[in-house]
């Protein structure tokens, strides 16, 4: 059972890492701005997307601070 | 107010004297940062004050001044653009970096000297990309007719095979058309770069390094080339930009984003 537990744990860790990948969210922010610049999205769509991504970054920040007490960088 | 020693880095230029571009930089301490240069020998780093401790996110309010500074700088001189988010602790750190990489910086400045980047995106203006590709490829059309033209429903395997052939022909069509465009531009440009097209209706995403003096001729050429293509091909060009796609330089500085 220990082996199975480890797999579950690894899968959970990987899912968490993807959910809290700050670089990926920042890349999405830059991509959204490029789309705004080349006219593929509207001002409104960009503002909505940026706000959504900033909210995700704030969430990552809160998550990281929550982990901070356990010695995370 | 504490004095900031940190510097946000926009790009690198050739200059012997400090250049002041005015208060057009990223916001710092409530106002736009004054953009100037930090020089070693004849290379200047274009910078403005920015605290390395400040949270720096690629938001519109930061990306806009970053791009605006590059546009302003490249009006008068060729610039090696930095990607967004490079912050140095102080001027000395920048000087050390410029010294350490002086040969590589010089080589890249030579490469893009007197040139600007122009972008060209070509899209298919069609309702269905699937119908369009089937329409220009006989083998794909025959396969589609064979598996959908009979009374029994196609198997999952057949649908997958058709999907694969479609992807293959879509990419082949993109390559064929991109090669055609590159051939038509080869005499008027210094270098070309083929970017991966994003979106299923995107045919090609190209970047060209063009001499400043040849920019007008390049724009006229775009209209000529576009005129040689059927009406479902939409040509969309942009620029001039700093030569982002034609600089290969690693300064060993991590971007903050």
Image: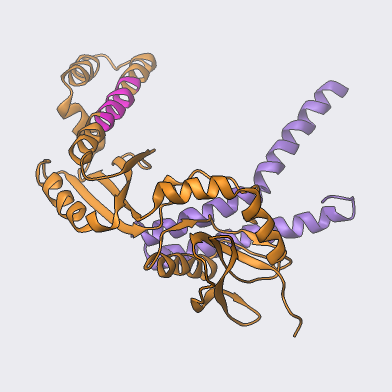
Closer to the camera in the image, A71 or B220:
B220
Picture layout, residue B212 above or below residue B186: below
Q: Which residues are magenta?
A: B164-175
Q: Position of residue A14 (x, y in %)?
A: 71, 36
Q: Position of residue B125 (x, y in %)?
A: 20, 46
Q: Could you tell me which residue is drawn at 89 percent across and 55 percent down? A: A69
Name the dominant secondary structure of the magenta segment: helix
Is B225 situated left or right of B203 in this image? left
Is B220 situated left or right of B156 in this image? left
- Chain coloured orange: B
Residue B76 seen in this snapshot? yes
Q: Could you tell me which residue is drawn at 38 percent across and 61 percent down? A: A37
Colour of chain A, in one word, is: purple
Q: Is residue B117 magenta?
A: no
Q: Position of residue A21 (x, y in %)?
A: 66, 47
Picture layout, residue B73 above or below residue B247: below
Picture layout, residue B91 above or below residue B237: below
Q: Could you tell me which residue is drawn at 34 percent across and 54 percent down? A: B115
| Quarter in which the N terminus of chain A is drawn | top right
Q: Is residue B167 magenta?
A: yes
Q: Position of residue A61 (x, y in %)?
A: 73, 59
Residue B168 sits in quarter: top left
Closer to the camera in the image, B139 or A23:
A23
Is B103 situated left or right of B91 in this image? left
Residue B34 sits in quarter: bottom right
């Amino acid at each position: 059972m220990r082996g199975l537990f480890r797999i579950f744990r690894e899968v959970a860790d990987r899912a968490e890492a993807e959910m809290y990948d700050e670089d990926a969210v920042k890349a999405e922010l830059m991509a959204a701005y490029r789309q705004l610049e080349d006219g593929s999205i509207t001002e409104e769509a960009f503002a909505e997307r940026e706000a959504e991504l900033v909210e995700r970054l704030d969430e990552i920040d809160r998550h990281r601070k929550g982990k901070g007490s356990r010695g995370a960088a | 107010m504490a004095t900031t020693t940190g510097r946000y880095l926009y790009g690198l230029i050739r200059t012997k004297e400090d250049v002041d571009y005015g208060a057009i930089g990223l916001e710092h301490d409530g106002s736009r940062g004054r953009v100037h240069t930090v020089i070693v020998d004849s290379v200047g780093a274009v910078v403005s004050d920015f605290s390395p401790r400040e949270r720096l996110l690629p938001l519109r309010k930061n990306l806009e001044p970053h791009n605006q500074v590059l546009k302003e700088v490249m009006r008068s001189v060729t610039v090696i653009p930095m990607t967004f988010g490079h912050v140095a602790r102080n001027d000395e750190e920048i000087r050390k970096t410029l010294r350490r990489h002086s040969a590589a910086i010089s080589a890249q400045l030579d490469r893009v000297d007197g040139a600007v980047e122009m972008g060209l995106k070509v899209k298919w203006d069609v309702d269905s990309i699937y119908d369009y590709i089937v329409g220009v490829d006989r083998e794909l059309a025959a396969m589609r007719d064979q598996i959908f033209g009979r009374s029994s429903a196609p198997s999952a395997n057949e649908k997958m095979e058709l999907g694969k052939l479609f992807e293959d022909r879509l990419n082949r069509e993109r390559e064929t058309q991109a090669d055609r465009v590159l051939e038509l531009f080869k005499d008027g440009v210094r270098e070309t770069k083929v970017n991966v097209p994003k979106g299923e209706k995107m045919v090609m995403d190209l970047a060209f390094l063009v001499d400043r003096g040849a920019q007008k001729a390049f724009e006229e050429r775009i209209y000529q080339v576009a005129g040689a293509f059927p009406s479902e091909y939409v040509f969309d060009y942009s620029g001039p930009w700093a030569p982002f796609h034609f600089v290969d330089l690693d300064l060993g500085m991590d971007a903050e984003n």
